[in-house]
Image (tube, grey):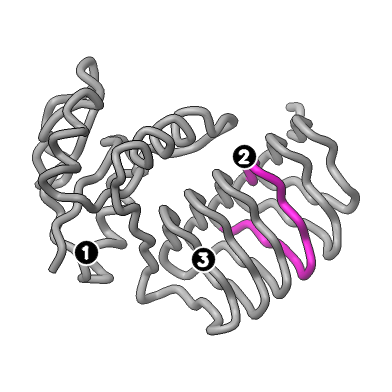
Amino acid sequence: MNSLILVGGGGHCRSCIDVIEAEDRYTIRGVVQPVDGDSSMVIGYPIIGSDTDLPDLIDKYSHALITVGQIKTPATRIRLYRLLKSLNACLIKVVSPKAYISAHASLEEGCIVMHGAVINAGATIAENCIINTQALVEHDTIIEAHCHVSTGALINGGVVIREGCFLGSGSVLREGIEIGPGAVIGAGQIVLNDVPEGTVLRSVL
């Protein structure tokens, strides 16, 4: 199996490890973590360096996955994606064996599809996206780069989600609407109309 390094060692990394182990296509060699981050192992995998070590690590292992989570802003994931691309890293895509992706759907590099997620026919998902546990991406939906579809989110058919969006857990998007770039849809929100660029929709308690 190809060797793999993980870039980012927080809670999302632990979830990614579980999916990578279940898929059983890569051998995880270790985790890259900021110098001021936690230096302990991540569920059994060693910290093997920081961002400054990536040139040497990519030269040695070549395959990588960004395992930094994304809440509110995709900035860190975008920065790491661009850095890894500049180093000619092979950014893998990971799909849980407990997920379903239609043979007529498209999934680009750097994406992870987690346990119980469903991606139906005609859906296209661009690079560096997270499709989290039990999320539904219905037919003919377009999800642009650097988006996070959180746990249990429901995206109905023909939705367009522009670059850098965050969809919170349990959010529901009506068919045929468009979510503008950088929008944040909070947990549990029901979205029936188009959402402009940079909008933040969330409940106020």
Give the label on residue 21, or none: 1
Q: Specify start and end residues of the magenta stretch as a single range.
A: 152-167
Q: Position of residue 57 (x, y in %)?
A: 15, 39
| SS label for mark 1 | helix
Check the picture and name the quadrant holding the N terminus: bottom left
Distance between mark 2 and mark 3 Cα atoms? 16 Å
| SS label for mark 2 | loop
Q: Of label 2 and label 3, which has the lower sequence position? A: 3
Q: Residues within 10 Å of mark 2 (few under 14, many from 20)?
A: many
| SS label for mark 3 | strand
Question: Where, by quadrant of the figure, is residue 142 drawn?
Answer: bottom right
Farthest bottom residue in view: 103
In the rendered image, which residue does mark 3 sit on? 107
Give the label on residue 164, or none: 2
Along the horizontal axis of the image, is 63 left or right of 168? left
Question: Residue drawn 19% across and 64% down?
Answer: 26
Distance between mark 1 and mark 3 Cα atoms? 20 Å
Question: Residue drawn 74% across and 34% down?
Answer: 202
Mark 1–mark 2 contact, CB under 8 Å? no
Along the horizontal axis of the image, is 118 left or right of 139? left
Q: Is residue 203 visible?
A: no
